[in-house]
């Protein structure tokens, strides 16, 4: 079936409509719609969990980034820099490390970039 003129959500809704009527098996439906059985079962699971809103396209962006600097560390660095504007990122990281010994601190270059993005560094 050509799906050029049909959106992905409409294709999924048509698939679920045919699945609910139980005229065809999941394998036959997958073949008719040009998808794998694994994708067919995935669509069925999404529909069972979220109804028609579960069939919408989801963002593929990760929910979090494991190597991104935590918000607490950023706030601490920015707070220290506003309190003592003459101190550089290396010294600020040293202070944060002494205040919070359990934190995993970023590199000096990352701290400098955080301060620069906050507008606390003069060119």
Image: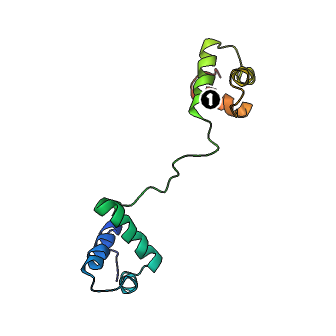
The one of 21 and 92 positioned closer to us in this rendering: 21
Quarter of the image with the N terminus in it: bottom left
Res 85 quadrant in image: top right
Which residue lies at the image location 57% right of the left edge and 24% below the top edge? 119
Is 23 left, or right, of 39 in this rendering?
A: left
Q: Position of residue 37 (x, y in %)?
A: 44, 79
Q: Is residue 18 visible?
A: yes
Label 1 sits on residue: 73
Regarding mark 1 in the picture, which secondary structure is present there? helix
Q: Position of residue 5 (x, y in %)?
A: 30, 73
Quarter of the image with the C terminus in it: top right
| For residue 108, above or below residue 18 | above
The one of 65 and 81 positioned closer to us in this rendering: 65
| For residue 10, above or below residue 79 | below
Q: Is residue 36 visible?
A: no
Res 12 quadrant in image: bottom left
Which residue lies at the image location 64% right of the left edge and 20% below the top edge? 122
The one of 25 and 83 positioned closer to us in this rendering: 25
Count of all numbered marks drawn on residues in the image: 1
The colour scheme used to paint the residues is: rainbow
Q: Residues within 10 Å of mark 1 (few under 14, many from 20)?
A: some
Q: Position of residue 38 (x, y in %)?
A: 47, 76
Is 50 left, or right, of 112 in this rendering?
A: left
Is 62 left, or right, of 2 in this rendering?
A: right
């Amino acid at each position: 079936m050509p799906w050029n003129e049909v959106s992905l959500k409409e294709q999924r809704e048509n698939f679920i409509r045919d699945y609910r009527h139980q005229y065809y098996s999941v394998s036959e439906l997958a073949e008719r719609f040009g998808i794998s059985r694994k994708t067919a079962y995935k669509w069925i699971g999404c529909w069972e969990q979220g109804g028609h809103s579960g069939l919408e396209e989801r963002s593929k962006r990760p929910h979090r980034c494991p190597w991104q600097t935590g918000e607490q560390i950023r706030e601490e660095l920015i707070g220290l820099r506003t309190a003592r504007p003459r101190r550089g990122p290396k010294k600020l990281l040293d202070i944060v490390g002494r205040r919070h010994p359990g934190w995993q601190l970023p590199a000096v270059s990352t701290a400098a970039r955080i301060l620069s993005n906050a507008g606390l560094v003069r060119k």
